[in-house]
């Protein structure tokens, strides 16, 4: 019978500001967390990612590589970020070609939303369960699959 390799969740090579709270189990590596960041349990934050000060990431969320999250953002439970768009119908092993995700300041993302390789401007609200497939350049409330502007803020 084959033997499985088991890896424990870990927090490694993370640069943290002051007053950072991380609830374990969590898997964070090669990322930067600003001052007063909260990370709930069962969260993964991958490398080349920066989380702005005062941001809160709730449980069971996945933040892939190359994400920049602004200041005072709220990421609800079970939010997924994805930047490999499977353009050739399969995973792309070339990390450098993956999309970049940039989230502005004061953005709230509802539970269960999916954020693809996009830019979201300051002050947007993304409804629970929404799928953001295109960049959002206007402050407002967005929801649906794909996410659409419901009202301006």
Image: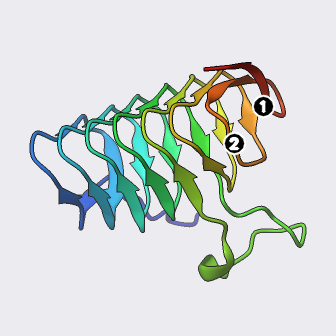
Is tag 2's residue or tag 1's residue first in the polypeptide sequence?
A: 2
Residue 84, percent across and down? Answer: 70, 64
At 77% from the left edge and 47% from the top edge, which residue is drawn?
Answer: 134
Label 2 to label 1, Cα distance in Å? 9 Å
Residue 83, percent across and down? Answer: 66, 60
* Residue 125 appears in the rendering: yes
Residue 91, percent across and down? Answer: 76, 69
> Mark 1 and mark 2 in contact (Cβ < 8 Å)?
yes
Tell whether 130 sits left or right of 102.
right
Give the residue pinned by disc 2: 136
* Quadrant of the frame with the C terminus: top right
Q: Secondary structure at mark 2?
A: loop
Give the residue pinned by disc 1: 147
Task: Identify whether 149 is placed above or below 33.
Answer: above
* Quadrant of the frame with the N terminus: bottom right
At 57% from the left edge and 66% from the top edge, which residue is drawn?
Answer: 2
* Residue 8 appears in the rendering: no
Tell whether 24 sits left or right of 104.
left
Task: Identify whether 5 is placed above or below 104.
Answer: below
> For the view shown, which residue lies furthest in the left direction?
18
Residue 23, percent across and down? Answer: 24, 34
């Amino acid at each position: 019978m084959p033997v499985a390799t088991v890896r424990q969740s870990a927090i490694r090579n993370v640069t943290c500001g002051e007053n950072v709270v991380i609830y374990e189990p969590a898997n964070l590596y090669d990322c930067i967390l600003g001052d007063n960041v909260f990370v709930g349990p069962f969260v993964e934050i991958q490398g080349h990612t920066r989380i702005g000060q005062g941001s809160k990431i709730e449980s069971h969320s996945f933040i892939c590589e190359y994400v920049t999250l602004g200041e005072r953002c709220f990421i609800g439970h079970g939010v997924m970020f994805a930047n490999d768009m499977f353009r050739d119908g399969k995973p792309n092993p070339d990390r450098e070609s993956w999309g970049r995700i940039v989230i502005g300041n004061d953005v709230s993302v509802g539970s269960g939303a999916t954020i693809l390789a996009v830019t979201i401007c300051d002050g947007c609200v993304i409804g629970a369960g929404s799928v953001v497939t295109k960049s959002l350049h206007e402050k407002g409330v967005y929801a649906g699959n794909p996410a659409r502007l419901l009202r301006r803020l």
